[in-house]
Image (cartoon, rainbow, N blue to C red):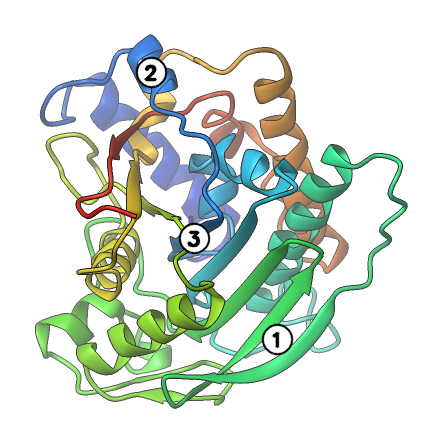
């Protein structure tokens, strides 16, 4: 979920989405609450969560992410394609020249969420806040990688594509976006921190595929989680969400022993809450941890009614592996 033009813009947009949902402007069949829950699969050896923004998996891919981190025999890898910078690039944050850049505050939220989930599953571990941090090369591309016990986090920091239904990018970052790269409207995307340049859609897909290959052990079962790109199930939707899913699915094409779950996003706010007990508690907890990362670094808090309306909800569809293990 990206911020676009500050908190007032966000609240206007959330109200607009709510009006569309209330008017029945969501295409296709709705998933029944109970049917959605039965598709939560046991974590695989490697669980990949590929998203556009630094809060997408916390909002829309729980409790799957929590269960992957909690399973001692499993590993969870979170790949964030955009900086979610709302057109600010690597510029100053909301608190002025001394503030952390907005994209960094969002990353801190994602990192806190990972630590929270591990420590919630291992309350006696005393694991602390320290994470391993390094620059790695995947598919010839430099990217920052964090790790914390059985969880790994990647940040590619590509420019935010602008709000739902747009995909145009921002003038301040050269109208770059995942959608425009795939459509050929721009020939390259430059990470907002200057760390890398992706020259064409295939270059980006190749880098994501290289992340998968680097993290997967030989013969290991894999479960890939993406946002639902089919408007028949999930509309309205953000262009960055759609194109992150397209990149991830293209990167995984032909992989053996790979299950795929596509998670609904914005439309879930108008559907019944279907997480209860520990699953619901964990969803609220991971979102509170995420929001604290932003507010502590002087970015607007996302602990507010608009975002919180997505909590305790999980709607998705599971595709079993097309090839054997």
Q: Is the C-beta separation of discs 3 and 1 under 8 Å? A: no
Decide: few, some or many residues near mark 3? Use Cα within 10 Å; few <14, some 14-19, many ≥20.
many
Decide: few, some or many residues near mark 1? Use Cα within 10 Å; few <14, some 14-19, many ≥20.
some
Give the x, y percent position of residue 159.
37, 73
Q: Secondary structure at mark 2?
A: loop
Identified at 30% across, 43% down, the residue is: 259
Give the x, y percent position of residue 29.
12, 19
Would you identify the image quadrant in which residue 132 lies? bottom right
Residue linked to disc 3? 48
Lower sequence index among marks 3 and 2: 3
Residue linked to disc 1? 92
- Is 272 on the left-hand or right-hand side of 215? left
Give the x, y percent position of residue 296.
76, 54
Residue linked to disc 2? 271
Q: Is residue 224 above or below residue 279?
A: below
- Is 157 on the left-hand or right-hand side of 246? right
Nearer the viewer's eye, disc 3 or disc 1?
A: 3
Q: Is residue 177 above or below residue 117?
A: below
Identified at 59% across, 61% down, the residue is: 152
Q: Is the C-beta separation of discs 2 and 1 under 8 Å? A: no
Give the x, y percent position of residue 26.
16, 26
Nearer the viewer's eye, disc 2 or disc 1?
A: 2
In this rendered view, identify the residue nearer to me: 141 or 210. 210
Identified at 55% across, 40% down, the residue is: 68
Identified at 35% across, 89% down, the residue is: 197
């Amino acid at each position: 979920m990206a911020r676009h033009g500050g908190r007032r813009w966000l609240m206007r947009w959330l109200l607009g989405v709510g009006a569309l949902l209330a008017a029945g402007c969501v295409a296709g069949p709705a998933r029944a609450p109970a049917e959605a829950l039965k598709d939560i699969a046991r974590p695989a050896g490697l669980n990949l969560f590929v998203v556009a923004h630094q809060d997408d998996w916390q909002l829309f891919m729980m409790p799957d992410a929590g269960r992957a981190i909690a399973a001692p025999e499993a590993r969870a890898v979170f790949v964030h394609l955009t900086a979610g910078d709302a057109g600010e690039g690597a510029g100053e944050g909301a608190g002025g020249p001394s503030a952390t850049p907005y994209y960094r505050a969002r990353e801190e939220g994602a990192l806190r969420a990972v630590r929270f989930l591990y420590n919630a599953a291992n309350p006696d571990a005393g694991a602390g806040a320290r994470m391993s941090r390094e620059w790695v090369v995947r598919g010839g591309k430099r990217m920052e990688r964090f790790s914390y016990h059985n969880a790994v986090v990647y940040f590619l920091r590509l420019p935010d594509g602008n709000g739902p239904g747009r995909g145009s990018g921002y003038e301040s970052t050269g109208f770059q976006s995942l959608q425009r790269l795939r459509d050929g409207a721009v020939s390259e995307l430059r990470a907002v921190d200057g760390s890398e340049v992706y020259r064409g859609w295939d270059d980006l897909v190749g880098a994501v595929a290289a992340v998968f290959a680097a993290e997967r052990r030989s013969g290991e079962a894999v479960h890939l989680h993406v946002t639902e790109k089919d408007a028949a199930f999930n509309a309205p939707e953000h262009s960055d969400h759609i194109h992150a899913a397209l990149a991830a699915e293209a990167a995984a094409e032909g992989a053996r022993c790979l299950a795929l779950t596509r998670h609904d996003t914005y439309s879930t706010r108008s559907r019944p809450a279907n997480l209860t007990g520990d699953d619901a508690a964990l969803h609220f907890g991971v979102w509170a941890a995420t929001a604290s990362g932003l507010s502590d670094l002087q970015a607007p808090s996302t602990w507010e009614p608009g975002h919180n309306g997505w909590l305790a909800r999980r709607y998705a569809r599971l595709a079993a592996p097309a090839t054997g293990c």
